[in-house]
Image (cartoon, rainbow, N blue to C red):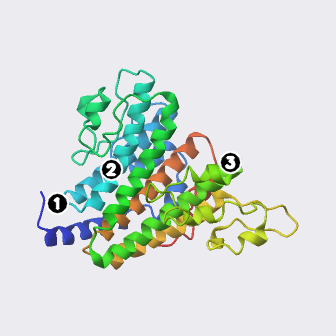
């Protein structure tokens, strides 16, 4: 039941604090990687009884169960508000944007059954009961432009447009937040978007040998003008022409603390995976600190979402690692988790 704003602020902050205290984040994150089987992982993170299915199927079910629990928990938290802040609702919309990609792909391949999607009710942008009429499903929403079954050749452009539109929606709604936490939320959001752009740019350069001009067309921008000084993309654009093998150049980088180590006499190449893992750990620690720094504003729930989504990513990493018989030490590195993780 929705409460008045003041009562909801107090209740939600206390509830979210308790949920974070029992989450597998910070120092507790390493516990996820101590399990030896998928059954152990299920017992650790799921409330339901372990289903009697093959290991490969169990891994998939576990990831779905963990994801759905995360989404439902978040929806319950923001449903305590009669009118949740737009930025809090935008976080749920992340899954609608992902869902429409799945729906479009399924229709493109002429599938009759609607694919499994994340339940975003009652905050949905999409009218899922209108399947398979894609135009009716998106009608009246900010996704109404997605009004026909895409050709295979259209999917990449559509997915890019969806990704950018979601970030722009989120950014616009951060601007509407409580003034006492707006600066911190903008800093958190920008930190994430800028790093994702940097990592995407590096991957396109390293693995696809794209030119700087080509890469610019694949970055996320805060406006449709795609300016080089764009608040989202400027940090990625700045490094596009840097020599990926010059440690001397990269050690002067603004984010040099995230770089993979350099060993004298050994060929060095900038490593996006290392950067991602190093940043992930620092970013989650930042969100955990911010959770407690701005109580009774939108900030705690945004931080809760960031931290719990990271926990979900770690659960998926462990699940996949167990299924593929990957060492848990490697899995921990992939998740940006160490025995000394702090928070």
Say whether disc 1 or disc 2 marks the residue closer to the N-terminus. 1
**Mark pair 3, 2: CA separation:** 31 Å
Q: Is residue 57 left or right of residue 122?
A: right
Which sits in the foreground, 35 or 119? 119
Give the residue pinned by disc 3: 210
Q: In this view, does 123 lie to the left or right of 69?
A: left
Q: Residue at 36% across / 72% down in the picture? A: 291
Give the residue pinned by disc 2: 93
Q: Quick one: SS at disc 1? A: loop
Q: Number of numbered discs present?
A: 3
Give the crowd class for mark 1: few <14, some 14-19, many >=20 residues within 10 Å: few
Residue 300, disc:
none
Q: Is residue 7 left or right of residue 332?
A: left
Q: Quick one: SS at disc 2? A: helix
**Mark pair 3, 1: CA separation:** 45 Å
Q: Quick one: SS at disc 3? A: loop
Q: Residue at 56% across / 63% down in the picture? A: 228
For discs 3 and 1, the disc positioned in front in the rendered view = 3
User: What is the x, y in percent for residue 257?
Assistant: 64, 73
Give the crowd class for mark 3: few <14, some 14-19, many >=20 residues within 10 Å: some
Give the residue pinned by disc 1: 83
Q: Is residue 288 above or below residue 149?
A: below
For discs 3 and 2, the disc positioned in front in the rendered view = 3
Classify the position of the N terminus by image quarter: bottom left
Say whether disc 3 or disc 2 marks the residue closer to the N-terminus. 2
Q: In this view, does 51 lie above or below 260?
A: above
In the picture as drawn, the residue positioned furthest to the right comes out as 265
User: What is the x, y in percent for residue 122?
Assistant: 21, 46
User: What is the x, y in percent for residue 95?
Assistant: 36, 46
Which sits in the foreground, 73 or 94? 94
Q: In this view, does 228 lie to the left or right of 26?
A: right
Q: Answer whether residue 27 is visible to the viewer in this image.
A: no
């Amino acid at each position: 039941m929705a409460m008045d704003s003041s009562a909801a602020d107090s209740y939600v902050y206390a509830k979210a604090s308790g949920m974070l205290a029992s989450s597998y984040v910070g120092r507790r994150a390493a516990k996820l990687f101590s399990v030896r089987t998928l059954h152990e992982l299920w017992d650790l993170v799921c409330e339901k009884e372990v289903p009697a299915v093959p290991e490969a199927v169990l891994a998939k079910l576990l990831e779905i169960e963990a994801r759905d629990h995360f989404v439902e928990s978040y929806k319950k938290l923001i449903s305590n508000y009669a009118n949740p802040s737009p930025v809090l609702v935008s976080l749920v919309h992340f899954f609608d944007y992902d869902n429409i990609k799945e729906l479009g792909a399924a229709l493109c391949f002429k599938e009759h059954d609607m694919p499994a999607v994340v339940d975003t009710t009652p905050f949905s942008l999409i009218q899922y009961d209108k399947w398979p009429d894609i135009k009716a499903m998106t009608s009246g929403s900010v996704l109404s432009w997605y009004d026909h079954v895409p050709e295979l050749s259209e999917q990449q452009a559509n997915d890019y447009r969806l990704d950018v539109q979601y970030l722009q929606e989120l950014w616009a709604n951060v601007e509407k937040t409580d003034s006492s936490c707006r600066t911190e939320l903008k800093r958190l959001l920008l930190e994430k978007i800028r790093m994702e752009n940097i990592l995407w740019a590096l991957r396109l350069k390293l693995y696809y040998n794209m030119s700087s001009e080509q890469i610019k067309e694949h970055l996320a921008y805060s406006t449709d003008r795609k300016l080089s000084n764009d608040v989202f993309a400027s940090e990625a654009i700045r490094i596009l022409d840097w020599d990926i093998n010059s440690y001397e150049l990269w050690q002067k980088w603004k984010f040099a603390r995230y770089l993979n180590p350099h060993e004298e006499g050994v060929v060095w190449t900038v490593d996006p995976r290392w950067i991602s893992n190093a940043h992930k750990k620092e970013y989650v620690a930042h969100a955990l600190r911010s959770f407690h720094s701005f109580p009774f504003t939108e900030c705690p729930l945004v931080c809760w979402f960031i931290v719990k989504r990271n926990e979900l990513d770690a659960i998926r990493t462990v699940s996949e690692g167990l299924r593929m018989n990957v060492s848990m030490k490697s899995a921990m590195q992939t998740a940006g988790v160490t025995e000394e993780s702090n928070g």
